[in-house]
Amino acid sequence: MSIISKLFGKSPFEPLYQHMIKVKECVDLVRPLMDAFLKGEDTKLKDMAAKIFKAEHDADVVKKDIRNNLPKNIFLPVARGDLLSFLKEQDSIADSAEDLAVLLTMRKTAVPEELKPELKEFVEKVLDTYEVAMTVSSEIKILAETSFGGVEAQKVMELIEQLKLKEWEADKAQMEAVKKMFSIEKKLDPVSVMMWMHILDELGTLANHAENAGDRMRMMLHDS
Amino acid sequence: MDSSLLTLVLVIAALVGLYSAINIGANDVANAMATSVASKALTIKSAIFVAAFCNIIGAVLVGTHVANTIRKGLVDPLQFSDRPILFVFGMLAAVLGSALWVNIATYFKLPVSTTHSIIGGVVGFGLVSVGIAGIKWKIVLYVVLSWIISPVFGGIIAFTIFSIIKKFILSSEEPIAQTRKIGPFFAGIVIFILSLSVIYKGLKNLHLDLSFRDALLVSLGLGVVGYYFGKFLLQRYKERQEDPYFQVEKMANPFQILSAGFQAFSQGANDVANAIGPVAAIWAVLQTQKVEMSVSIPIELLVLGGAGLAFGVYMWGYRVMETVGEKITSITPTRGFSAGFGTATTVLLCSRLGMPVSTTHVAVGNIIGVGLARGISAINLDVIKKIFSAWIISLPAAGLFTVAFYFLLRLIFL
């Protein structure tokens, strides 16, 4: 019976890092998914969607594990609430990827040639935002090592600023894509318009969650 | 007084005291070294060696103060002038009662402190033998206060040390260069505190009594030597193409070993009294055939107690260090150094003031101190509640066992 060993709880930071890896495995599939969608390759689209569902589930398992290991009487170097909301936002990125995959596979929606450039641009901007968010998340272990302060925290803060900029660009690209879609609305049937709204919206949501994850990370750094 | 009976009592007390010392060594001391083992600053083998060695030195050089508190600080032996045998039985009962209680508590997995148990035992026998008025309540109050203050005090030191490391090393642009600059100061401070505690009024056993000014100067000198030694060690480190924070932790390894040794030293100084304090009391009566205040504790007893601690670490420390070390991998050398330094300084200060404190509780306070400086990834605060409840039970429980032994001894021999 050693009171000293009982004093140490399970660190949530390594699992948080693992969660980031799982989210990354999931969201990295969005690019091939969108590629297949743009090219109208049905089998590849379904294949990617299936892989995304699986990866999203894996991320969920890690998320639940982290939550279950964080009872209220665990004292952490960051506020417990901030950590949990960061985890939630990071997980929501994968959720958005999953929802997008659902939208693209539940109905065969053709991509009009005119929309392709704007759509490609929008997807790139969203994925740019997501990638910066993952870079921010991957710093979590080093931050724990340097106890959430100093040069490392500064570096992450700068990344978070960059993340905000990327998300803003993604927002602009979303506007362009939506505008373009309505400019050709006469050519589209109403159901397709509705689907396009959903698809573009979901891509925007993915970028939003990426930005929010950065914001939550900033809250963890702030009270240092 | 029958001196063969007295000798028998002394031998029994010494054996039980030795048994306690081995227990303390196996559990508490091994616990203290576990942080170094966890952070891989030391292998288990060398941790055992460092612990055993520093334990004996601490016990022999600084062990008398706390032992004297237990021997004559809580219950005034002079009250037994007409019947010293009762005092002798009481002390034997305290050793037996607290040892029994610690064993029972360990069986039920309660995190009790040997220190609290022995104090509970001595006060318990005092209460039934000479009554409420016979106990030096002021000292008892100081001791109990020291149990509350010491973990907090240690926690503040650990918090400060880790905050300094954080501010000047972990947060800097050049963590490795900063470690080379700041590190040697820590080595110097550790050596300075250690030397001062030993040299100033601590070397009675070696008949080397220096004035405070001289002791301070000598300690400062040794501190400077420590500074340069630390500097030498850090200069020798070859920078690699790796994560700089990881390298800082590597560079902090020798410092954590230093603080672990420091901790084992302080622990020896404080904990040896739990084992040999009552034995020393009995020995003093046997020597003079009456109760005396001024008899000093023989160095042989301190060596015996220190050797018991060391033997305990040697025999069973391996298992404890292994299991504890596996569980606390989140503690890295910078954190381990901060917590170890705070624990050792606090325990040593308490030892010099004659305050028997629980080294494990001080260590817990220090780890929480590092945690408050955001140095530890997860701390289970439930432990504090458990410690408090174990401490509240320990005093009356060990007291009751002691009282039972006391009456049993009286029944058999008188």
Image (cartoon, helix red, strand yellow):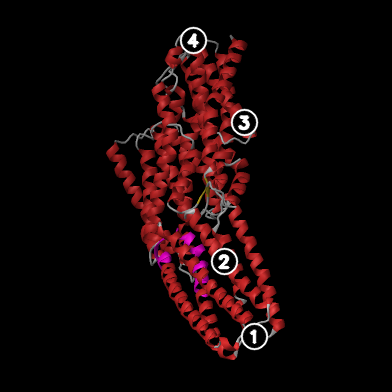
Location of residue B344 with respect to A23 vertically, above or below: above
> Circle 1 marks a residue in which chain?
A
Which residue carries the number 2 mark?
Answer: A92
Q: Amino acid at mark 2?
A: Ser
> Circle 2 marks a residue in which chain?
A
How much space separates mark 1 and mark 2, taking CA atoms? 27 Å
Image-based side of B175 in relation to A39, left or right = left
> Circle 3 marks a residue in which chain?
B
Which residue carries the number 1 mark?
Answer: A110
Question: Which of the two discs, 1 and 2, sits closer to the camera?
Answer: 1
How much space separates mark 4 and mark 1, taking CA atoms? 105 Å
Q: Please tell me whether residue B322 belongs to the stretch shown in magenta.
A: no
List x then y, in percent, for residue A144: 49, 59
Q: Secondary structure at mark 1?
A: loop
How much space separates mark 3 and mark 4, taking CA atoms? 31 Å
Q: Secondary structure at mark 4?
A: loop
Local packing at callout 4 (Cα closer than 10 Å; few below 14, some 14-19, many 20+) is few
Are labels 1 and 2 assigned to the same chain? yes
Tell me the tag on residue B83. 4
